[in-house]
Image (cartoon, grey):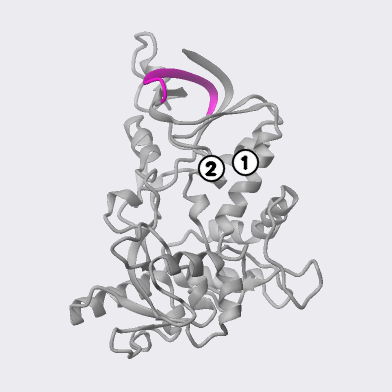
Amino acid sequence: MEIRTDFLVIGSGIAGLCFAIKAADLGSVAIVTKKEKIESTTNMAQGGIAVVMDASDSFEDHIHDTLTAGAGLCHESVVNFVVSEGPERVQELIRWGVEFSKKDNGPPALYDLGKEGGHSRRRVIHAADLTGREIERALIEKAGSKKNITFFENCISVDLILESAIGGAKKQPRAKKDKCLGAYVLDVDNNKIHVFRASFVLLATGGAGKVYLITSNPDIATGDGIAMAYRAGAEVANLEFIQFHPTCLYHPEAKSFLISEAVRGEGAILKLRNGSTFMERYHPMKSLAPRDVVAQAIDTELKKSGDEYVLLDITHRDPQFLMERFPNIHRNCLTFGIDITKDPIPVVPAAHYICGGVVVNAHGETSV
């Protein structure tokens, strides 16, 4: 079967859905997703979005924190662009129906802001500890209201279709860009390959955390988009830059359950199993140091001690506050016999985010 569309979006997380919602005003959009449309890494995100929302905060401070955490590897122009665009993009999500948590004791328009590692102040807007799930819900609902958008669930993109490979056409000279015309897609329900032809193709396939045994990512995060782009001749870079989240729940029956960085933002302290703290030996921000610093510190301590995990202790905070601020974490930990209001949480670093990938320009265009 051949399906023709103006825009082909591969992936149904925040990136793919945001693009699809806007592109639907310009033409037909097909969203291909390998399982159910709601199943994405976006749906598993807990902490929130770092954005300048408070009058006491500034773009300059946010940029400074980002460049510091980036250890000189960030493109400053990109950091400036992303930080300055942040407030409007968050307002756009709100207009599309995302309901972020608001302060209990403030005006209705005042959002609760959390704090996470590497940030000098509170600037993380969130929806309790289920931010990704709330964003995914709202965006799927918004996309569903657009008559030009069609979802194709349980469909796995196998390879991109290149102009140079169609109809026996001669391979393009190396100096000339090849053109992507669509994708071959496996319909899992029917075990058939379909041809999706499109004027524009957006890769929004998420990360590759499942190449690691211990990861915060769902089973779908297998790096499909990067692999397809590489086979198509697109430039890839920095694939060795894998971010490890410091605090994934350690339990033999727990699968890929993250303990949000926001827990440390609300005062949780990392400790060894003997109860002693250790982050003061690694960074002035202690448990709220940037993720790479904290993950490396935990790894170092585990190798020294021979232990399998460290502890994240937030038992000193009010139990009611914890249950309201972290309902999902509280509920899930209880299923494993851990009451975060009374018990320190066993945690280990886990593969979380691939910082490299397909090289794009400022407009998101690849070399194909």
**Residue shown at the point (78%, 76%) measured from the top left:** 106
The magenta segment is: 189-200
Query: Farthest right residue?
Result: 107
Q: Secondary structure at mark 1?
A: helix
Q: Position of residue 14 (x, y in %)?
A: 56, 47
Q: Mark 1 or mark 2: which comes first in sequence?
A: 2
Whether residues under marks 1 and 2 lie with C-beta atoms below 8 angstroms apart, the answer is yes
Residue 229 placement, left or right of 214: right
Label 2 neighbour load within 10 Å: few <14, some 14-19, many 20+: some
Relative vertical location of residue 180 with respect to residue 209 in this rendering, above or below:
above
Label 1 neighbour load within 10 Å: few <14, some 14-19, many 20+: some
The mark found on residue 31 in the picture is none
Relative vertical location of residue 239 with respect to residue 142 in this rendering, above or below:
below
Q: In what quadrant of the picture does the C terminus appear?
A: top left
Q: Position of residue 96 (x, y in %)?
A: 72, 47
Relative vertical location of residue 319 with respect to residue 199 in this rendering, above or below:
below
Residue type beneath disc 1 = Ile
Camera-nearest residue between 263 and 244: 263
Q: Position of residue 68 (x, y in %)?
A: 47, 73
Q: Determine if the magenta segment contains residue 103.
A: no
Residue to which mark 1 is pinned: 140
Which secondary structure is most common in the magenta stretch?
Answer: strand
Q: Determine if the magenta segment contains residue 194.
A: yes
Residue 309 placement, left or right of 257: left
Residue 248 picture quarter? bottom left
Camera-nearest residue between 229 and 256: 256
Residue type beneath disc 2 = Ile
**Residue shown at the point (30%, 73%) measured from the top left:** 296
**Residue shown at the point (40%, 48%) measured from the top left:** 207
